[in-house]
Image: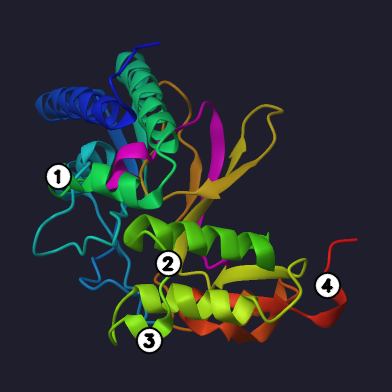
Amino acid sequence: MPHYLSPQQGIKEQVGILEERLEALGNKMRASPDRLRVDASYLIPFRDQAEVDETKGITVTPLDGSEALQRVIYGLTSTRIEPGKQNPRETLRVPAVLALPHDWLHELVELNGVRQEIERLAGEIEEQYERSKAWASMRYLSSLQVIRQTWIVSGPARIRFYWDASPSVQNKTAADWIKVYTKHLKKLHGYVPAIGELPEGDNSRKFVEAITSLSGISPRERIAAFRPGQPHVRARVSFIGTEPKALRPSPTPIVYPIDDPVPFIVPLSSYEAGELSEKKWSRTKIDLEPFVESMYLHRYLKQYRFSK
């Protein structure tokens, strides 16, 4: 395993390797399009804003021909956002099914290893603030597009694309949330400031407010940081043999050996606004009313507030 002066230096070094090899692979694909086959490709437009507008649907456009080819290659090899088109908080989505020769598949397997190493190095940077600085030091780099590994399958029989909006839930006790927020404030200010010391609009105010609210309940109570799920693309893959079905997010092309039989593909449809909203709370035991709205903190329903 390589040795680095710091995780930050290692990330920068590995990103350089990743981008160089991705560019070379993309150039090979463009130069020899007869060596690959695009079985399905879908265009999902950028929303060009940080937050998802839940009142709007998402139009999905099937692609074919050279347009599909170029989009799929871009989806496999892009690591940076498109200035003026892609919001920094928005990730690239290019769901597709792509058949490749074994040498290119082998290269993608190795590149997945590079992505995994970058993710490992990022995990060694404990502070979120420092991780963000590391990513921001490389202009327009998308951390998610860098660490997102290519889904490589063998012998797919059926691939079904669909939309999902599962929520994100992180659990800690009230005492543990206070520790997290206290550490963050001390990192920024050297101490935990009083709310009156911070000007209106200061991002630190919400951390102070959360500490105050959490201090008023039992330190052992379980509190959830609950973020309603945003619509995202998933795929369900069944296989020719006895391998169990696979289910996972699929924002970038699914690739498989070109000498395998072509799988049956259930295409991705457009997303209708609100069609998944009823599922957001049904899967949880969390109080609908926010406890600390600015931090997405929710109490559990009374019977679930303490670990047994």
- Magenta range is 142-168
Q: Nearer the viewer, mark 1 or mark 4?
A: 4
- The answer to the question of whether label 1 and label 4 lie on touching residues, with beta carbons closer than 8 A, is no
Circle 2: element type: loop
Task: Give me the C-alpha separation between circle 1 and circle 4.
Answer: 54 Å
Residue that numbered label 2 is attached to: 269
Task: Give me the C-alpha separation between circle 4 and circle 2.
Answer: 38 Å
Position of residue 291 measured from the top left corner of the image (x, y, whole percent): 61, 83
Circle 4: element type: helix
Whether 297 is drawn above or below 176: the answer is below
Position of residue 1 measured from the top left corner of the image (x, y, whole percent): 40, 11
Q: Quadrant of the C terminus?
A: bottom right
Residue that numbered label 1 is attached to: 66
Tag 2 or tag 3, which sits nearer the N-term? 3
Residue that numbered label 4 is attached to: 304
Q: Nearer the viewer, mark 4 or mark 2?
A: 4
Tag 2 or tag 1, which sits nearer the N-term? 1
- Label annotation for residue 196: 3
As drawn, the residue found furthest toward the right would be: 308
The amino acid at mark 2 is: Ser
The amino acid at mark 4 is: Tyr
Dot 4 surroundings within 10 Å: few (below 14), some, or many (20 or more)? few
Task: Give me the C-alpha separation between circle 1 and circle 2.
Answer: 21 Å
Indicate left or right for 134 with 118 as reference: left
Whether 74 is drawn above or below 156: the answer is below
